[in-house]
Amino acid sequence: MENKRVRVRFAPSPTGGLHMGGVRVALFNYLFAKKHGGDFILRIEDTDQTRFVAGAEEYIINSLKWCGIEPNEGVGFGDGPHAPYRQSERKELGIYKKYADKLIEGGHAYYAFDTTEELDEMRKRMEAAKVAAPQYNAVSRQNMRNSLTLSEDEVKKLLDAGTPYVIRLKVPRNEEIRFHDIIRGWVVVNSSQVDDKVLLKSDGMPTYHLAHIVDDVEMKISHAMRGEEWLPSAPAHILIYRYLGLEAEMPQLAHLPLILKPDGHGKLSKRDTSGLPMFPLNWQDPRDNSSYVGYKESGFFPEAFINMLVLLGWNPGDNKEIMSKDELIQLFSLERINKAGAKFDPEKTKWFNQQYLRKKTDEELADIFMPMLKEHGVEASKDFVAKACKLIKEKAHFVNEFWLLGFFLFETPSSHDAAVLEKRLNAQSYAFIEELKNELSDLSSFAAAETEACFKATAEKTGIAPGQVMQLFRVVITGVSGGPALYEIMELIGKEESIKRMDFFLEKNKI
RNA sequence: GGCCCGUUCGUCUAGGGGUUAGGACGCGUCCCUUUCACGGACGAAACACGGGUUCGAUUCCCGUACGGGCUACCA
């Protein structure tokens, strides 16, 4: 048990797009597996036929790939020794029924024939009787139609007649259940709080409760990490392991804190990410055709996305925040995961992307930026674009801001900032620009230092304070009032283009 | 309602019986820059409350409050 090979799984159900909370669970599993040289498995928990969403499985796989947290075993990543990894397919093999039968034989599970209506009535009755927690349990089961209340003959007759039934876990009435959680320590719950969970549904499919246990055991999972929302049902799971005689095979449990809404309260939901995406990739829901933009399409780097997610509930113990995937693998440990839920912080998420943007080389940025330039009808050499990126990147959080921040590096501005013109354009400054153009035209080198010196000399010669014309000159060249160092811009676009822009301006604003 | 889990600056968090309670995001001021940004400096900003235990609790225990989760033939 102690030296068991580390094998963890991410086991989503294909009921929609994988959201960032799910990605984080996958990430923690991935990091833990890699840290210990173990296996990371993708298992698809598609036992609910009614909630199946076409395309969800593929979306999950693509998301994990984009995030760079790929499983090494399971659906979409090469089947391993425990195939199949889709629960619907495992069900066809009779795997779950076998375990359910074993529980029945051991007297720890039973057949229940109650219809939905009968169950509703029971709940209503109990509510009317002011029962604190209406549930199918050791007490209420005595008034229901199941193999515990019916005679053996009746049960056989119903079964033979093909009457729909479920198999329920027979939870003892009053017994203390304790279990150890890596993150939370010992948790104690009385079995009176646990209901007789359905293990096998009337359509023959197992529920999550049965299926995940059977699969975790058969797939030799060593550690089960999942969201905190599973904590209340963990006692029932402990019972199932026990009644199956599999307590020794039980993975160690770790219930992860949830990601909470940035403001307001509650679990993070699709609507409450304050303008940032909920999903890693664009997701279109086939059920209602609603669509959501992804982090990828919003211009986030996967490294930044992952880095942000991992620090929601975990930290390396020092003040380090920007960590590569390799560093994360190195540093990761379950013991340093917090107990409390973490509110999602959109502002800091953007900051993470900015940090990664800065780390990229100008060439890498050029590769990302060039397709965007093409959309604006700009064709430029990679060398030129890389130089442009060098100037722009300090001001951006995302590559998709580059165009807005530096379009004037690629095309002659068609208009000039009106506010600056209003304030700075007059006969004297106009004459200065004219004179400056002549001086710049004589320059043999257009290196930033040369043009800057030329600007200063011209200002001195004409007796005008540089501050009076600097901003105007910037607008002449770029059209806008803010941007990278002006002389760097001119060096990049070159003498010919710079002079051209000055001519254009002088012509357009003739006094 | 019941059960379970939690609670350090607005947010993510470090720390842990004796600290000027540390860092980051965001915010503010200043410096750099004849722009914006980057960078730098500085600043405002937290141990939910009440009882214990203790020479001493933010740290340990118990309550309370607040927050979150669960309460399906969903996962």
Image (tube, rainbow, N blue to C red):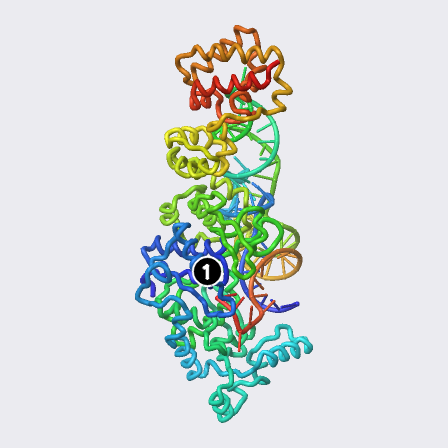
Q: Is residue B8 left or right of residue A246?
A: right
Residue closest to the eye, B75 or A275 = A275
On the image, the x and y values in percent for residue A52 come to 49, 66
Query: Which quadrant is the N terminus of chain A positioned in?
Result: bottom left
Q: Position of residue A379 (x, y in %)?
A: 42, 32
Q: Amino acid at mark 1?
A: Gly
Viewer-nearest residue: A274 or A368: A368
Q: Is residue A62 left or right of residue B60?
A: left
Question: In the structure shown, which secondary structural element does the residue marked by tag 1 occupy?
Answer: loop
Residue A136, relative to residue A386: is it above or below? below
Q: Is residue A368 above or below residue A381?
A: below
Please report the residue visible at 41 percent of the width from the left and 69 percent of the height from the top.
A87
Residue A334 in view: no
The reply to whether residue A381 is in sight is yes
At label 1, counting other C-alpha atoms closer than 10 Å, the crowd grade (few under 14, some 14-19, many 20 or more) is some
Residue extending farthest bottom: A153
When asked about the image quadrant of residue A193, the answer is bottom right
Q: Which residue is mark 1?
A: A55
**Chain ID, mark 1:** A
User: Residue A234 versus residue A275: which sits nearer the camera?
Assistant: A275
Identified at 42% across, 16% down, the residue is: A446
x then y, percent, for residue A502: 52, 17
Left or right: residue A42 versus residue A170 is left
Q: Residue at x 60, y 81 (%)?
A: A118
